């Protein structure tokens, strides 16, 4: 348990460092949310100064950070300048949408990566393995932005998929089956984009890990005893190859989250991505910091899950 305790302490310190760094970067940025209001001749300088004082923008960095930290423990994460409400409820809705998108894409990507990686490793050097290598290499050369824009173009030109949003008009009037179908139709394109963006490196890592294990003596002995190839792959090789893949799982969450912010903006999925972009443009400080911290929490939580799985499966870590 000392291993998990150390990882938890490191995660808390990392989140603290991210919050300080985010606040510091925003402090260095010129202007603030109320800067454009100063250009309006109908608004007096006294009114602008009163607004800045109301939201604490006239305070030095340590005091502002202390006030925000207290708001975090209260559960509101500060007050949004643009909406005039606590940041936490605004982020909760977007976070739910982002988790739905990334969770679906992550599950599909890993299922495909394990299946294709094992299949490719078992057929190492054959035409199927080479064709898979060409396909993954081709996908790796395509920038995520180009891939997402191409998918948006296909949706617009063909009309096969919704081009934005999470649900259609009149969603509340649909039956349960109709709601699921409508949500799946809106989810399909952004989830597919995330899967295609993250799948190639996952397949390559699974293939490499499986090839290393398949060359081990115990696998050769299992084959010599007449055990079927499928059982050798699933029962003997995959559990041994799981350790590096569990570590990769944490990194894949980071890649999935970074790609999701982009795909949400391009394909208009109502998640954290568009909300963060709007907040940055408006210099809504507490929304920006809250969105950055929420994304960081998702990333750290994913790594903690990977560490817990390693702790449960690898006795060498439990002996540490």
Image (cartoon, rainbow, N blue to C red):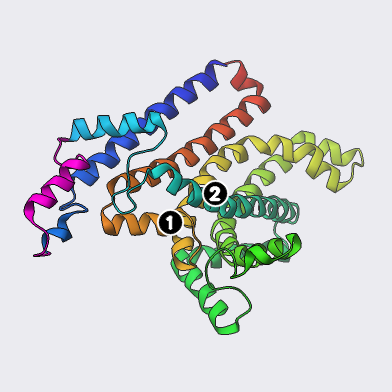
In the image, farthest residue toward the right: 226
Residue 254 on image: x %, y %: 48, 46
Q: Residues within 10 Å of mark 1 (few under 14, many from 20)?
A: many
| Residue, disc 2 | 96
Magenta stretch encompasses residue 291: no
**For this view, does 219 lie left or right of residue 272?**
right
User: Quick one: quadrant of the C terminus?
Assistant: top right
Q: Residue 31 appears at what percent x and percent y? A: 15, 53
The residue tagged 1 is 273
Res 262 label: none
Residue at the bottom extreme of this rendering: 157
Task: Say which of 54 and 305 sits in front.
Answer: 54
- Frontmost residue, 283 versus 2: 283
Which residue is rendered at x = 20% and y = 31% of the image?
63
**Residue at position x 62%, y 69% from top?**
170
Disc nearest the viewer among 2 and 1? 2
Secondary element at tag 2: helix
Give yes or no for contact between labels 2 and 1 (Cβ–Cβ under 8 Å).
Answer: no
In front here: 34 or 261?
34
> Which quadrant of the structure image shows residue 190?
bottom right
Residue 225: x %, y % from top left: 91, 38
In the displayed structure, 311 sits above or below 75; it is: above
Depth check, front residue: 190 or 178: 178
Q: Is residue 230 rendered to the left or right of residue 198?
A: right
Q: Position of residue 155 (x, y in %)?
A: 57, 77
Dot 2 or dot 1: first in sequence order is 2
Query: Which residue corresponds to the image point at 63% horizontal and 53% vertical from the top-left?
Result: 104
Quadrant of the drawing holding the N terminus = top right
Horizontal side, residue 303 vs residue 224: left or right: left
Q: Which residues are magenta?
A: 40-60
Q: Residues within 10 Å of mark 2 (few under 14, many from 20)?
A: few
């Amino acid at each position: 348990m000392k291993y998990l305790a150390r990882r938890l302490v490191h995660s808390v310190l990392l989140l603290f460092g991210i919050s300080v760094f985010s606040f510091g970067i925003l402090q260095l940025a010129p202007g603030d949310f109320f800067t454009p209001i100063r250009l309006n001749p109908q608004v007096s300088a006294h009114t602008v100064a009163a607004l800045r004082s109301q939201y604490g923008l006239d305070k030095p960095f340590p005091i502002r950070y202390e006030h925000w930290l207290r708001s975090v423990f209260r559960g509101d994460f500060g007050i949004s300048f643009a909406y005039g409400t606590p940041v936490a409820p605004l982020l909760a809705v977007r976070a739910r949408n982002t988790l739905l998108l990334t969770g679906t894409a992550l599950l599909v990507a890993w299922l495909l990566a394990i299946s294709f990686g094992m299949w490719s490793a078992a057929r190492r050097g054959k035409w199927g393995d080479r064709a898979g290598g060409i396909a993954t290499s081709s996908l790796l050369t395509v920038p995520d932005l180009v891939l997402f824009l191409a998918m948006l173009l296909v949706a617009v030109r063909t009309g096969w998929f919704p081009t934005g949003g999470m649900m259609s008009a009149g969603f509340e009037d649909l039956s349960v089956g109709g709601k699921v179908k409508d949500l799946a139709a809106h989810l399909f394109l952004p989830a597919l984009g995330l899967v295609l963006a993250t799948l190639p490196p996952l397949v390559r890592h699974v293939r490499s890990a499986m090839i290393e294990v398949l060359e081990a003596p115990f696998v050769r002995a299992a084959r010599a005893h007449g055990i079927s190839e499928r059982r050798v792959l699933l029962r003997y090789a995959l559990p041994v190859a799981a350790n590096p893949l569990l570590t990769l799982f944490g990194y894949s969450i980071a890649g999935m989250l970074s790609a999701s912010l982009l795909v949400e903006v391009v394909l208009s999925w109502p998640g954290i991505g568009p909300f963060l972009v709007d907040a940055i443009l408006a210099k809504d400080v507490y929304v920006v910091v809250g969105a950055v911290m929420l994304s960081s929490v998702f990333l750290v939580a994913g790594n903690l899950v990977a560490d817990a799985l390693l702790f449960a499966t690898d006795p060498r870590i439990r002996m540490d």
